[in-house]
Amino acid sequence: MDTNILLENGTNELEVLEFMLDGNAYGINVAKIKEIINYQEVTLVPNAHPSIEGIFMPRDTMITAIDLKNCLQRGASVPGGLFIVTNFNKLDIAFHVDSVVGIHRVSWTEIIKPGTTVSTAEDGVSTGIIKIDGRLIIILDFEKIVSDINPETGLKMADLSELGERTRNNIPILIAEDSPLLNHLIVDSLKQAGYENLMHTENGQDAYDIICEYKEAGNVLDKVKCVITDIEMPLMDGHRLTKLIKDDERTKDIPVVIFSSLVNAEMKRKGEALGADAQLSKPEIGNLVKTVDKLVLGKE
């Protein structure tokens, strides 16, 4: 299946691949997918996590295969079906699924945030739910699934220890990140780095509402010195937020840092076209601080 579907920049849309697992419909952002291939025999890895089926090497690239059914506590997969080969956070990972249904183009405004009856914000593996033709498709949090298997793939908090002594400052920074855990970690990291005036929101729309309030008051450039945004968020994604900021004469000079698991070559081209000042993959929390230093303090 061709996953090379190009979306216009900043339209607040995404492509969701619907796939089946154990009779249930799930979704993944097409931007994470490299290819979809038939199941291949894998080599078992001794003492690996129970959700890791093994490894295989198509075209001389080693890929870890994850048993998604096991991750969702639905038993273990059997040979057959498909591998959805993904790339995010600079990792190539294949997820074993039963079948693929198709691709749906939707707006981020159509994605329903799961309630606490579905999952708690910290423990859940669903980032949203969409309704297509009367059925519900659960969009899975693949970053969390992978970091639960191997925490080393998450934010590299140890990088912050290399920053040394920091001077406290009151520079206002606006953060848009829908994951409560990542939002908390980004705020903690910036505070550890000396940034104390932080506004954090859970989606691009809430962040843009804050910017609009300051625009109306005429002091937006004093109240927002930098924006850090994820790409994948409900209501408004980070690309749309970047476009709105950079297309407005009153806000175009505000530095925008895209901090996302989706910073691959194609996404970098999109971010550059929208005017993003910097783009970083989520494990690079130390580089995030250094990038903010450069943009708001002029540090090299």
Image (tube, rainbow, N blue to C red):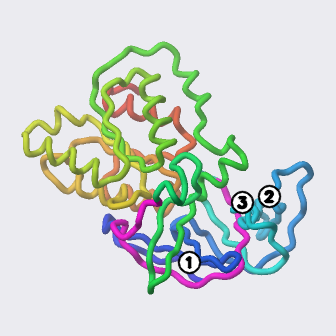
Amino acid type indicated by mark 3: Cys
Q: Position of residue 106 (x, y in %)?
A: 39, 75
Dot 1 corresponds to which residue?
Answer: 18
Residue 71, disc:
3
Quadrant for the N terminus in the image: bottom right
Local crowd size for mark 3, using a 10 Å CA cut-off: few (<14), some (14–19), many (≥20): some
Residues rendered magenta in the picture: 91-114
Q: Is residue 147 left or right of residue 172?
A: right
Which residue sits at x=43%, y=33%? 187
The reply to whether discs 3 and 1 touch (Cβ–Cβ < 8 Å) is: no
Amino acid type indicated by mark 2: Ile
* Residue 69 sits above or below residue 213 on the image: below
Distance from disc 3 to disc 1, alpha carbons, whole Å, reads 18 Å
Q: Helix, strand, or loop for circle 1?
A: strand
Depth check, mark 3 against mark 2: the one in front is 3
Which residue sits at x=77%, y=70%? 59
- Dividing the picture into quadrants, the one containing residue 11 is bottom left
Q: Helix, strand, or loop for circle 2?
A: strand
Residue 60 forms part of the magenta stretch: no
Distance from disc 3 to disc 2, alpha carbons, whole Å, reads 9 Å
**Which circle's residue, 3 or 1, is located before the other in the chain?**
1
Local crowd size for mark 2, using a 10 Å CA cut-off: few (<14), some (14–19), many (≥20): many
